[in-house]
Image (cartoon, rainbow, N blue to C red):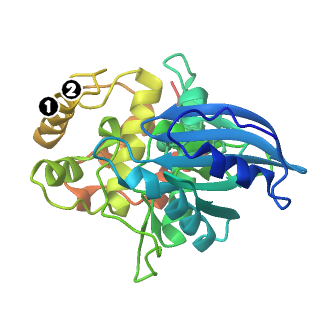
């Protein structure tokens, strides 16, 4: 029997049953991610490279158990391939594995201007495409942006918290948005979580998170001055308080990029550009060339 390197608490028998199903002859499994109740295994399914994602409740975060099946439903609504099922302790899905470099791999504090501009441009264009398709990402961060090799569309992953726009149907398996990764969480989401209100991610909250992701990737620092790295519950309240208070760090990025990111990080959601506008600005600054430094 093919065994995935999945440990305790996941319902391994169920997962192995899935792996053994004749329709899913998965092979060459490699555990790539195991955090907060969520695991990702890269594997081969015939000619296809796939990601097998499974989730189980994590402390009070019971939604993590439902996240894989919800994400599969979002992927299918977007026309992407995904199959899903349950484990003893949660849910799983299989989706295509996307080759490429995550934004945090593509961008470093040493990246030349043109690499920063092109990476930010491609990330903004991928976000604009998601918004155009009628979905808000809801948890954008550098490792959710995959810049793919030439000829393939760049892709945003981890759509477990994505929200439909324009009256599109919500996924059948659903749960209230729990807030984002705090490092990239915009002020309006942080304020809602702190106040015990249900956060409502929007296209403009995604834009803030995209800009915060770019700043983190090429400065190595959070855009908000917050106690970090710390992951305990007290730290999260302090981090969200700093975000909601708007305690911004200064960062220096040359040319058009700095201006675009400053606009995207406005505390007022309606003052932020749309992702498509960000992409247009970042794309046009390549053609002009005069802003490069
Ligand atoms: N379809 C995929 N293609 C390529 N890498 C993936 C894919 N799914 C997950 N990963 C990798 O696994 C990591 C964790 O996946 P993610 O979906 O963000 O899990 P979580 O919900 O636990 O945050 C990603 O940052 C990425 O490196
Ligand atoms: Mg993730």
Front position in the image: 1 or 195: 1
Mark in front: 2 vs 1 = 1
How far across and down, in percent of the image, does residue 62 sit?
Answer: 35, 52
- On the image, which quarter does residue 287 sit in? top right
Residue at position x 24%, y 62% from top? 270
In the picture of the structure, the residue carrying the numbered disc 2 is 226
The residue lying at 60 percent from left, 64 percent from top is 75
Q: Which residue is mark 1?
A: 238
Work out which residue is located at the far top of the displayed protein and give it: 110
The number of callouts visible is 2
Q: Is residue 86 visible?
A: yes
Q: Residue 49: horizontal and vertical position, in percent?
A: 80, 46
Instruction: Depth check: give the residue in front, 132 or 31.
Output: 31
Labels 2 and 1: the sequence-earlier one: 2
Local crowd size for mark 2, using a 10 Å CA cut-off: few (<14), some (14–19), many (≥20): many
Residue 141: give its label. none
């Amino acid at each position: 029997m093919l065994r995935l390197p999945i440990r305790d608490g996941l319902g391994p028998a169920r997962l192995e049953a899935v792996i053994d199903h004749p329709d899913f002859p998965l092979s060459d499994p490699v555990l790539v991610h195991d955090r907060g109740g969520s695991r990702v295994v890269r594997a081969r399914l015939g000619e296809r490279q796939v990601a097998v994602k499974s989730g189980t409740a994590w402390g009070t975060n019971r939604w993590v158990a439902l996240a894989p099946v919800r994400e599969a439903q979002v992927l299918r609504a977007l026309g992407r391939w995904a199959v899903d099922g349950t484990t003893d302790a949660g849910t799983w899905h299989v989706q295509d594995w996307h080759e490429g470099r995550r934004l945090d791999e593509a961008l470093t504090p040493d990246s030349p201007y043109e690499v920063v501009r092109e990476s930010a441009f491609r990330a903004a264009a991928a976000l604009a495409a998601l918004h155009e398709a009628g979905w808000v990402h809801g948890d954008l961060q550098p490792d959710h942006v995959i810049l793919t090799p030439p000829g393939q569309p760049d892709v945003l992953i981890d759509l477990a918290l994505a929200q439909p726009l324009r009256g599109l149907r919500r996924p059948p398996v659903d749960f209230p948005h729990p807030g984002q990764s705090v490092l990239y969480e915009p002020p309006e989401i942080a304020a809602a979580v702190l106040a015990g209100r249900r956060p409502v991610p929007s296209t403009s909250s995604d834009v803030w998170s995209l800009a915060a992701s770019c700043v983190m990737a090429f400065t190595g620092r959070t855009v908000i001055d917050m106690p970090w790295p710390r992951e305990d519950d007290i730290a999260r309240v302090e981090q969200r308080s700093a975000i909601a208070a708007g305690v911004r760090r200064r960062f220096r990025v040359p040319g058009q990029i700095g201006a675009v990111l400053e606009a995207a990080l406005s505390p007022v959601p309606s003052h932020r550009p749309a992702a498509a506008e960000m992409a247009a600005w970042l794309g046009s600054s390549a053609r002009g060339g005069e802003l490069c430094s």
